Amino acid sequence: MADTSDTPYLPHTPADDAASSAATASGAPHDPGDAGTSHNPLRSPRLAAGILLAAAVLAIVLANSPLGPTLLAVQATEVPLPVAGHTLSVGHWISDGLLAVFFFTAAIELRRELTVGSLSSASAALRPAIAAVGGVVAPIAVYLVIAGSSAPDGWPIPTATDIAFALGVLAVIGRGLPGRIRVFLLALAIIDDIIAIIIIAVFFTDDPRPVPLLLAAVGVAAVAVLSRTMPGGVLRTVLLIVVGVAVWAAVLSSGVHATIAGVALGLALASAPGDTAAHRLEPVVNGAILPLFAFSAALVAIPSVPLDELAAPFWAIMLALPLGKLIGITAGALLGRLVGSGGERLTLGDALVVASLGGIGFTVSLLMNELAFAGDETIATEGTLGVLLGSAISVVLAVVVVAVRRSALRRTAGR
């Protein structure tokens, strides 16, 4: 049997790409949920979004049931890490360990978009980049206005857009919308992930230690060299996995959040093995890793306090996600229309669709919440509720905006 380990996964045939590009360029309606499932239902963004939502809802229900104390105790159970000499709770194994795999696959997609995809030229990347920056700055402003005096550390929480959940919701509700909306949302969400990664690396690094960081850098360089020079096969795969785990352990020991290891490894891995790895991991990420993280992060007991006694961060996050993202992304997208020449430009209606979906923070915002309020369990719990409600409001808002946009497109097409 021929060795296909160096053959990259191609999500579409050339004919599919040509048809998609033609549909996008013409503004023709496009169903963003049908392509790329590759016969495995766990590759479907619709199913992935449904599993994420179900995991979060189940966690909230169980946390507030008689099983709640037991589940919370299991989440807090510490499990030693034999390699790096650390002891992590089950919850931290999920958020620091498993989530690094998600960031690894996201980084591979980012590298692909930067080299051959929608971000491969400066002009193509600039417009969603401006919208992404607007979608970070405006939520920070909304948060600080509401909670800046009482809990300023929570400002990063509403800056994130959950790429998997946002694209999944678009796949569910976006039938009949122009393909340019999904392309722009994907580019914006990837750039948003870059900003989130920088925020985590810069603001949530506790007492960085240079020696483990240096060892991690050597490991990342080794992955880059091995994936480009060593013949494909089982031996290379095993070596890359071993070095990758060592890099993760070194980053964990350095004080930098361990998910950064996944980002570095995903960007360093050569194109063909990287695309293959992302393709093989996609069902695991969609069906297990992200739902486990959503379940763990949403496993909170709802505080039995009146609404007027909830802390300011709850209100700030709940409003900053839908409102801040709506204002910031829309303004950024419209500003981006003035930059450069040629290429696809979003209309106001398209921008509002992307902006409403951009308020779905979910998994990445939940991670930010864990990091920002690590020292205050009460505020962290209310922050989690703020993320969940803010993301839910964004979903409802997106459904309304998409319905209005679809109706407008139908009226235009009927003229």
Image (spheres, grey):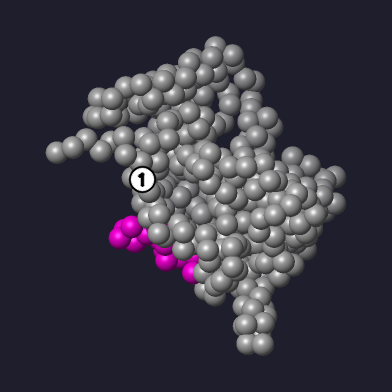
Front residue of 377/167: it is: 167
The C terminus is located in which quarter?
Answer: bottom right
Left/right placement of residue 343 relative to residue 51 reads right
| Total numbered labels placed on residues in the image | 1
Up/down of 143 relative to 121, above or below: below
Give x and y (percent) for residue 226: 37, 22
The reply to whether residue 367 is visible in this rendering is no
Give x and y (percent) for residue 321: 70, 57
At 53% across and 66% down in the image, what residue appears?
A: 23
Up/down of 168 relative to 406, above or below: above
Task: Provide the residue designation for mark 1.
Answer: 9
The N terminus is located in which quarter?
Answer: top left
The stretch of residues the image draws in magenta is 31-50
Tell me if residue 2 is in the magenta stretch: no
Furthest residue to the left?
1
Disc 1 is placed on an element classified as: loop
Front residue of 113/15: it is: 15
Furthest residue to the top?
211
At 53% across and 39% down in the image, what residue appears?
A: 115
At 34% across and 28% down in the image, what residue appears?
A: 241
Left/right placement of residue 2 relative to residue 168 reads left
Tell me if residue 32 is in the magenta stretch: yes
Front residue of 6/205: it is: 6
Q: At label 1, which amino acid type do we have?
A: Tyr
Front residue of 161/25: it is: 25
Give x and y (percent) for residue 122: 67, 41
At 62% across and 82% down in the image, what residue appears?
A: 413
The reply to whether residue 83 is visible in this rendering is yes
Label 1 Cα crowd, 10 Å radius (few <14 / some 14-19 / many 20+):
some
Give x and y (percent) for residue 372: 67, 40
Left/right placement of residue 130 relative to residue 84 reads right
